[in-house]
Image (cartoon, helix red, strand yellow):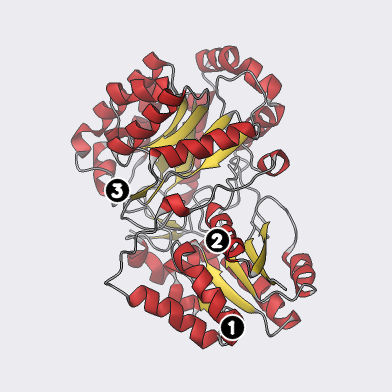
């Protein structure tokens, strides 16, 4: 009889409503791990994604305890870690024999906390763990000894002779039903006059850049070293998704443009196969140019998410965003202009509250946003997440109970800007008002996307509610931010 293994992505339990719409992507890491465990033949896996299946931790713990699984793998984030720990304790209380394994962003960034005596977790699997998860679970099944299973993983980490780059082509194509795919909402307006069914692919892992705000807490992957799937393998999966009714692919790479040869190979494979599919991705501005964008457009790219961050060179330098901060704004202008000319829509991502940032700096960002003319913008608060370089400088000022409130959609727990908290929240609202309430923006946006919104009324409602909340100032109340000079 196959042993049961449950894999759980913990939810936004007891967090306040975000003023922003949340893009909900599937937990690909857990899904890949489940596929490998299923292939072994000894296990029956089940995934609970509590970010979209809004089940309470109490109800879920009660349900799982009746199934007597061999192990439970829980992926948690820093902004829900206390509720996740409470959930794990409930699981232990219901069945003391169950082995609870921590994975995910918070467990990777704060491994020692998860291994402390107070922790309800038995084992921590950091980073991507598909290449070792079957060995760890096999040891649990055969020996029943948690310490022996830990040794398997520790030996894996200590083995410096082996090539630790997992062959991403060995990850199985994930089986999705249209009903399952519908759970994961696509939130950006695109020029497609049809109801969107989005499929999700990760073609690479890692990011070599060293931005001070980047953390496993918000990235899709964990390592700095980049690893890539072959173009044929990626496009095979895209073709399979098309047969399942998908009409838009969202590449979930942290940086889809991380290697020019990789993105070119995927585009050329799509073109060679004459695959009629539209797709979106997140790319870095300083890795794009008109030639590359032209090939991406020919291969079906219709939207790029581009992190501008700021229109002020000093802030870009402080963020360690690029090796050429002096050229950042002009490069940004060039890339957005090329996208407009080619018909690739853009979403510009900005941050406010960056270290030493002033209101005058933010005004420069607002002026740049207007000049770039993206289809959409999102303005995040600078957040020193656990795992970032800057977190180590401020962590002594962050009480443990406030880590749960560290999220770039919420007012900062730590304010590193040159503004006080009330002004910082005000300038974020001011940014949105200045961009979204321009008559020319509203008219052009409705002309371009009216049919898309008719087919995707949920997206229209979500975006309208989001803009209304932010502009009217219906943000989450300040939770007592720590001001650090």
Query: Distance from label 2 to label 3 (Cα)?
Result: 38 Å
Binning the other alpha carbons within 10 Å of mark 3 as few (below 14), some (14 to 19) or many (20 upward) gives many
Image depth: mark 1 or mark 3 in front: 1
* SS for callout 2: helix
Residue 122 visible in the current orientation:
no
Question: In the image, what residue occupies the spot 51% across and 31% down?
Answer: 432
Q: What label sits on residue 36 in the rendered view?
A: 2
Residue 278 visible in the current orientation:
yes
Picture quarter containing residue 191? top right
Picture quarter containing residue 193? top right
Question: In the image, what residue occupies the spot 52% across and 35% down?
Answer: 238
Picture quarter containing residue 230? top left
Q: Is residue 70 left or right of residue 208?
A: right
Q: Position of residue 205 (x, y in %)?
A: 39, 50
Label 2–label 3 contact, CB within 8 A: no
Image depth: mark 2 or mark 3 in front: 2
User: Would you name the residue on which mark 1 appears?
Assistant: 142
In the image, residue 177 sits, relative to residue 92, either above or below, namely: above
State the quadrant of the C terminus. bottom left
Q: Position of residue 289 (x, y in %)?
A: 28, 26
Query: Distance from label 2 to label 1 (Cα)?
Result: 18 Å
Q: Which tag, 2 or 3, sits closer to the chain's start? A: 2
Question: In the image, what residue occupies the spot 53% across and 47% down?
Answer: 409
Q: Which tag, 1 or 3, sits closer to the chain's start? A: 1
Question: In the image, what residue occupies the spot 41% across and 24% down?
Answer: 272
Binning the other alpha carbons within 10 Å of mark 1 as few (below 14), some (14 to 19) or many (20 upward) gives few
Q: Position of residue 90 (x, y in %)?
A: 71, 76
Q: What label sits on residue 73 in the rendered view?
A: none
State the quadrant of the N terminus. bottom right
Query: Distance from label 1 to label 3 (Cα)?
Result: 49 Å
User: Would you name the residue on which mark 3 appears?
Assistant: 319
């Amino acid at each position: 009889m196959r042993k049961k293994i449950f894999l759980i992505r913990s939810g936004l339990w007891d967090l306040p409503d975000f003023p922003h719409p949340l893009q909900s992507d599937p937990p690909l890491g857990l899904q890949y791990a489940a596929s490998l465990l299923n292939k072994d033949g000894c296990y029956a896996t089940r995934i609970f994604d509590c970010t979209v299946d809004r089940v309470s931790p109490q109800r879920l713990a009660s349900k799982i305890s009746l199934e007597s699984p061999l192990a439970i793998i829980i992926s948690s984030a820093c902004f829900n870690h206390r509720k996740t720990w409470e959930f794990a304790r409930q699981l232990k209380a219901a069945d003391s024999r169950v082995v609870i394994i921590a994975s995910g962003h918070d467990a990777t960034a704060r491994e020692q906390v998860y291994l402390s005596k107070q922790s309800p977790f038995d084992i921590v699997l950091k980073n991507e763990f598909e290449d070792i998860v079957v060995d760890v679970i096999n040891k649990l099944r055969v020996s029943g000894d948690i310490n022996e299973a830990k040794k398997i993983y520790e030996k894996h980490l200590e083995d410096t002779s082996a090539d630790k780059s997992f062959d991403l082509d060995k990850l199985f194509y994930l089986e999705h039903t249209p009903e399952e795919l519908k759970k994961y909402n696509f939130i950006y307006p695109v020029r497609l006059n049809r109801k969107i069914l989005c499929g999700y692919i990760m073609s690479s892992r890692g990011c070599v850049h060293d931005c001070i705000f980047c953390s496993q807490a918000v990235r899709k992957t964990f390592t700095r070293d980049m690893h890539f799937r072959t173009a044929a393998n990626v496009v095979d999966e895209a073709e399979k998704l098309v047969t399942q009714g998908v009409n838009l692919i969202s590449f979930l790479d942290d940086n889809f443009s991380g290697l020019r040869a990789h993105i070119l190979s995927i585009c050329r494979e799509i073109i060679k196969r004459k695959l009629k599919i539209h797709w979106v991705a997140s790319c870095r501005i300083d890795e794009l140019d008109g030639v590359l964008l032209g090939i991406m457009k020919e291969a079906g790219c219709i939207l790029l998410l581009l992190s501008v961050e700021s229109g002020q060179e000093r802030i870009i330098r402080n963020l360690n965003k690029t090796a050429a901060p002096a050229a950042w704004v002009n490069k940004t202008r060039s890339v957005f202009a090329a996208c407009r000319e080619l018909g690739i829509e853009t979403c510009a991502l900005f941050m406010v509250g960056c270290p030493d940032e002033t209101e005058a700096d933010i005004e420069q960002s607002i002026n740049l946003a207007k000049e770039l003319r993206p289809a959409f913008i999102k303005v995040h608060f600078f957040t020193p997440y656990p795992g970032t370089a800057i977190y180590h400088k401020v962590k002594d000022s962050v009480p443990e109970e406030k880590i749960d409130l560290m999220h770039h959609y919420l007012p900062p727990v730590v304010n590193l800007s040159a503004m006080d908290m009330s002004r910082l929240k005000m300038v974020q609202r001011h940014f949105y008002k200045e961009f979204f309430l321009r008559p020319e923006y509203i008219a052009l946006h409705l002309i371009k996307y009216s049919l898309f919104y008719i087919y995707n009324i949920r997206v229209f409602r979500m975006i309208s509610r989001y803009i209304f909340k932010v502009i009217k100032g219906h943000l989450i109340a300040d939770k007592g931010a720590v001001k650090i000079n």
